[in-house]
Image (cartoon, coloured by chain):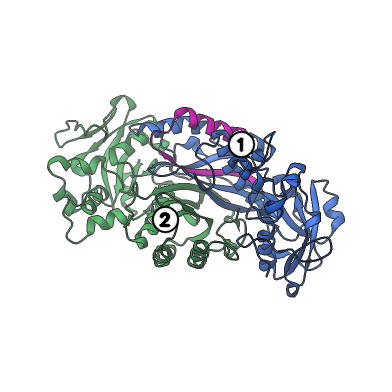
Chain colours: A blue, B green
Amino acid sequence: MTKIKSGGVVPAEFSLIYRHFRPLAGPGALDLRDDAAVFMPPPGRELVVASDAMVAGVHFMPDDPPETLGRKLLRVNLSDLAAMGATPLGYLMTTAFPKGIDDAWVARFAEGLALDQALFGVGLLGGDTVSTPGPMTLSLTIIGHVAVGKALRRSAARPGDGVWVSGTIGDGAFGLRAIRGPVADADGFLAGRYRLPQPRVALGQALVGVAHAAMDVSDGLMQDFAHICRESGVGGVIEAALVPLAPITRAAAVGENALLPFHGGDDYELLFTAPDDAAVIALGMPVTRIGRVVDAGEGVTLVDASGAAIDLPAGGWSHF
Amino acid sequence: MTKIKSGGVVPAEFSLIYRHFRPLAGPGALDLRDDAAVFMPPPGRELVVASDAMVAGVHFMPDDPPETLGRKLLRVNLSDLAAMGATPLGYLMTTAFPKGIDDAWVARFAEGLALDQALFGVGLLGGDTVSTPGPMTLSLTIIGHVAVGKALRRSAARPGDGVWVSGTIGDGAFGLRAIRGPVADADGFLAGRYRLPQPRVALGQALVGVAHAAMDVSDGLMQDFAHICRESGVGGVIEAALVPLAPITRAAAVGENALLPFHGGDDYELLFTAPDDAAVIALGMPVTRIGRVVDAGEGVTLVDASGAAIDLPAGGWSHF
């Protein structure tokens, strides 16, 4: 099977897509003309690879702007690399498009990808383009590299570490609600945070040798912190009052949504633990200390200013 | 976003899938517990990567046996590596499964993959598992490696080369028709060839230094030969009588299906050109010489025993 179909007597949608995707080809992609891409990894570096998929109606709305859709797909994958401390290299993408997809739509989708390729220094290495009778389904595999043995792992948190996050938390969850209607978002900040997350690639690389454990926050802050604690065999405490919220998110986090910043998903900020506060601060990056790692026996808790545990809604997260 | 969800407070289908997929984790997969896989590529080798996607109702039938489905997905990707002369290393897989997918179905799907992992020496490195309201959609990225500068390319055919194929041609196309009903297939040979193609991984590696151009036959013999000729800037002649057909395929290639072996798809055999017949024969592999590479001006043709050009059905292929 070919990577991205290369014209000839292929259906019109393949030629169309090929026309838009070939300009995205990066070094090693062989201009998307061969069965596979070939590239030389940097000598002495380990490779870091991850894949994420998005389905219309599940992970995005069918009428989402195509420019941001390709960028979000690329960015959630870049966020996985960031969480490992890796440097991005390139990506492969498979697209299952509904038959008769509009040429202009694909052009805009590719334009968005081109923007982010320049921004993050990656190129398209290959992929596959198929048609589907169902919802649009996109899958991307990102490839990066890291110094040997230096990848940031979820399992490396140790009691006594500080717990940190980048950026602001909760914007993505409120952004989804803003797009759907019930949350006010006059200037589109929240919707923008949902549609165009900011993968913390530079921060991730800077954290190599500084952080112990790291991951990106995609399922929700407390769920993901619980992942780190479980994989590391530790407990942890997050102080709700320390979690950095954007002003509009703070304003929206009231009533039934008061706890959404702590269990809503789609932040794509980095969550990490580090033994030395000063070393983290010295990086000069937008990060905030929000808690501490403790012994496993103390469990994983979100606490209020008085130190009392806060229970999150069922289905969101429950401490254990 | 995580790779394959790791339990905790995740929906039941993720735990289910995770339970079946974790045993497939290969070296470097970090037991599928982290944001990405980390592995050291063999020193001094180039990496070879490709992706292929399959959609239920388009590339397979929803009631296809789950054991062969995962294996076919892996094998069509392995076939891309074979076409480049690469040695397989591992793979990432994203699965969009309909909600409420059966535990036993996923178990059988994973069992098939485990079989082929052992057969081809690859391990699961990561991926993503999502649900879809539409048809099952599967995507796989394969990673392999090859000696620097030695990858087999489509663009390397030269006038005077012999044209060769591995195995037998046309079985996959007749296999699809056998599964759908109109073609007889008493012992299931044809259906088996469609459902479980045989990626020519060992042959591909052996062809490094022996073949000029190579690709795998997935769109149909003449379409794919035309791809090689176009990318190489050459013409070519395939002699229909030399194309190796299995006995049951030869028997089925009559009437309106007489030319199907030459333009039907899903063979996943290797098509390659080589300057030295003796060097190819010395490999001792199941390959057949079917034609020759000529100058671009002579075009790309399928000819009968008298040397007369054979036209293929519209939509299949037309020479140019």
**Which amino acid is tagged 1?**
Gln
Check disc 2 and report the residue beneath it. B74
Label pair 1/2, CB-CB below 8 angstroms? no
Q: Is residue A309 above or below residue A8?
A: below
Dot 1: within a 10 Å radius of its alpha carbon, few (fewer than 14), some, or many (20 or more) residues? many
Foreground residue among B153 and B192: B192
The residue under label 1 is: A117
Q: Which of B161 and A313 is in front in this view?
A: A313
Q: In the displayed orientation, state which residue is furthest to the bottom.
A: A297
Q: Is residue B91 magenta?
A: no
- Distance in Å between CA atoms under marks 1 and 2: 28 Å
- A97 relative to A285 in the view: left or right: left
The magenta segment: A88-116
Q: Position of residue A56 (x, y in %)?
A: 49, 44
Is B152 left, or right, of A199 in this rendering? Answer: left
Element type at mark 1:
helix
Q: Circle 2 sits in a helix, a strand or a loop, which is it? A: helix
**Residue found at x 65% / y 48%:** A173
Q: Which residue is drawn at 70% across and 33% down?
A: A187
Q: In which quarter of the image is residue B319?
A: top left
Residue type, numbered disc 2: Leu
Name the mark on residue B213: none
Crowding at dot 2, Cα within 10 Å, few <14 / some 14-19 / many 20+, comes out as many
